[in-house]
Image: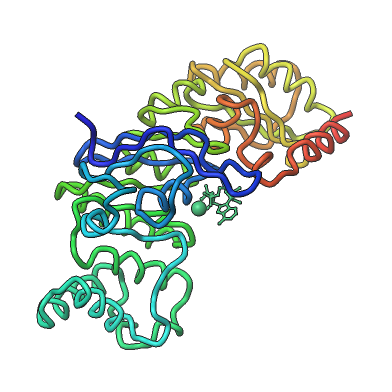
Amino acid sequence: MSGAIHAEGLVKTFGDVRALDGVDIDVPEGSVLGLLGPNGAGKTTAVRVLTTLLQPDSGHAEVAGVNVLTRPNEVRRLIGLSGQFAAVDEYLTGRENLQMVGQLYQLSSRDAKRRAGELLERFNLADAADRTAKTYSGGMRRRLDLAAALVVSPPVMFMDEPTTGLDPRNRQQLWEVIQELVAGGTTLLLTTQYLEEADHLADTIAVVDHGKVIARGTSDELKTQTGGDVVEVVVHDREHIERAEEVLRRLGDGETSLVTHTRKLSVPAAGGAKLLAEVIRELDGRGIEIDDIGLRRPTLDDVFISLTGHAAEEEANGRGRKANEENKGEQQ
Ligand SMILES: Nc1ncnc2c1ncn2[C@@H]1O[C@H](COP(=O)(O)OP(=O)(O)OP(=O)(O)O)[C@@H](O)[C@H]1O
Ligand SMILES: [Mg+2]
């Protein structure tokens, strides 16, 4: 049986760019899929296809068993969408924006008011509720847009980078709202650039790069693929970087990486704290002074380096090779 969101072989090209290059997606009912990838990976394009806003060149997609390509109007009644860029009416107040959405969904005017009030509280907008949205900060607009997507609770939700631009407190609160939503049975596809966020919210994660899903799994499975935790060392003396790197390479469990200008070295550490202790002993024994050392969880970049051999940033901004060459130049 296919899931609440199901797509096979989605392809979408814009001129020479293959924004989607054969994407398969399956999200079981009541679960959360995190679509994780760097800028330009194809996340928004996938969301737009699945929410009927964009026709793919080829492929097949269904939401709640309804064909997205042939029955878009039906699909629209089953889904909620919060886009990457907040879609609020600048000239209405926050409260009016939400009431309007309620009325579009044919709530009675009493219910629309009640729901707007609840959501304004929930998203910390009560104080600003009666100001026009054009006076709102970026984070406030973002929250209003998300609130608007939740006025009615559709069975299937799409959220494109819901927390980008939110401060830590609002991000935390949104995570709680999302968790409640999912506990109530909603199926959710969310996109993010943060492994930490996918980690926190998603049952399964699909990592996308250049329009392709390059890995799938739970967050733990992905982290294990990268070798688990990472030991990170900041070397005090630039001259010691090479010797320190040699130590990490020998003791660590994978590729070392180096950011020359911050003198920061890191290496996967399947052995966790045990490896950390060994590295400290070894560096100390060789008289290599350090400014900082620690064990951290892998980031999206670590997952990317391990999956593709390059950092997420590099190719996305088209300066990958140049950045590498500069880096090499500095090391010599
Ligand atoms: N309407 C369009 N016209 C031309 N190219 C497009 C269009 N929409 C997307 N693209 C290209 O398709 C690729 C994927 O874009 P998409 O917006 O899906 O990426 P994304 O993963 O959402 O990135 P971000 O994290 O920056 O939001 C990019 O190379 C982008 O430039
Ligand atoms: Mg996007």
Instruction: Give the percent coordinates (x, y) of residue 281.
Output: 63, 17
- Vertical arrangement, residue 265 with respect to residue 76, above or below: above
Instruction: Give the percent coordinates (x, y) of residue 165.
Output: 49, 62
Q: Residue furthest front?
A: 70
Instruction: Give the percent coordinates (x, y) of residue 60.
Output: 36, 38
Placement of the N terminus among the 4 image quadrants: top left
Splitting the image into 4 quarters, where does residue 95 fall? bottom left
Q: Nearer the viewer, residue 177 or 251?
A: 177
Q: Nearer the viewer, residue 55 or 315?
A: 55
Q: Residue at x 41, y 72 (%)?
A: 141
Q: Nearer the viewer, residue 74 or 102?
A: 74
Placement of the C terminus among the 4 image quadrants: top right
Q: Residue at x 66, y 19 (%)?
A: 248
Instruction: Give the percent coordinates (x, y) of residue 32.
Output: 29, 41
- Vertical arrangement, residue 40 with respect to residue 143, above or below: above
Q: Residue at x 57, y 37 (%)?
A: 210
Q: Residue at x 31, y 88 (%)?
A: 130
* In this picture, residue 208 sits left or right of residue 77: right
- Vertical arrangement, residue 78 with respect to residue 200, above or below: below
Splitting the image into 4 quarters, where does residue 326 fall? top right
* In this picture, residue 221 sits left or right of residue 301: left
How many numbered dots are placed on residues in this image? Answer: 0
